[in-house]
Image (spheres, grey):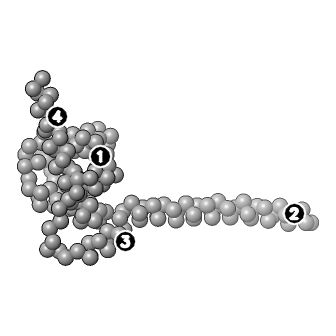
Amino acid sequence: MEEKQDIRQRRRLAVSRPKAGAAALAALCVLALWGCSGGEKKAQADKARPASVTIPGDPEAGRRVYGQYCHYCHGTEGRGDGPVSIGISPHPADFTTDAKRMSKTDAELFKSISEGIKRQIGGEAMFMPSWKDILTEQERWDALAYVRLLEKKGKEKNAKAAAR
């Protein structure tokens, strides 16, 4: 009799452990997504700053933001050749050769980063996600400062290659 009760108890534990493990895994996923999204940090940082203040970007801080979010599409050197870009048409912007796009003001590019890009071009949809709900305002300015640095470095590299 005790043996049957022991077997039943083991079965209950075996069934409840996967449920507990699944619940713990789900909780970890939610926490990880909250941490990646900027969550509370973003909301506090944006509320603490008056809307009329112009915020300059820091290229070094932008390098970290770019490395975490942007390089997948735009590539490590900003040439639009990131690992995800092969499946995107039209291809992501190449900051080093796209003179028309990069001639935009910082305010225009900041708006594109913040609100994203969604439009039709020659029958193909162009899309870049909105980053305003994921990155703080400062992080978006930092990413833009790094993009401008990539643009400068890329143009210098292109000029040297053309001079050879």
Element at badge 4?
helix
- Disc 3 element: helix
Mark 2–mark 1 distance (CA, rounded to whole Å):
59 Å
Residue 78 spot, x, y in % from top left: 22, 43
In this rendering, the label closer to the viewer, 4 or 2: 4
Q: Which mark is residue 40?
A: 3
Q: Position of residue 67 (x, y in %)?
A: 32, 49
Residue 123 x/y as whole percent: 15, 45
Q: Which residue is mark 4?
A: 157
Instruction: Tell me which residue sits at (35%, 69%) in the image.
Output: 41
Mark 1 lies on residue: 71
Residue type at tag 1: His
Per the model, the C-alpha gap separating discs 4 and 3 is 40 Å
Measure the C-alpha gap from mark 3 to mark 1: 24 Å
The amino acid type found where label 3 is placed reads Glu
Of callouts 4 and 3, the N-terminal one: 3
Q: Residues within 10 Å of mark 1 (few under 14, many from 20)?
A: many
Number of the front mark, 4 or 3: 4
Q: Quadrant of the N terminus?
A: bottom right
**Counting other residues with Cα less than 10 Å from the Cα at mark 4, is it few (<14), some (14-19), or many (20 or more)?**
few
Q: Mark 4 or mark 2, which has the lower sequence index?
A: 2
Mark 2 surroundings: few (<14), some (14-19) or many (≥20) residues within 10 A: few
Q: Quadrant of residue 65?
A: bottom left
Q: Amino acid at mark 2?
A: Lys
Q: Quadrant of residue 14?
A: bottom right
**In front here: 129 or 40?**
40
Q: Of the residues shown, which amino acid type is indicated by label 4?
A: Lys
Q: Above or below — where is 128 with respect to 3?
A: above
Q: Which residue is depicted at the point 36% across and 62% down?
A: 37
Work out whether residue 54 can be spotted. Answer: yes
Residue underneath mark 2: 4
Please state which of residues 152 and 117 is positioned toward the viewer in this rendering. 152
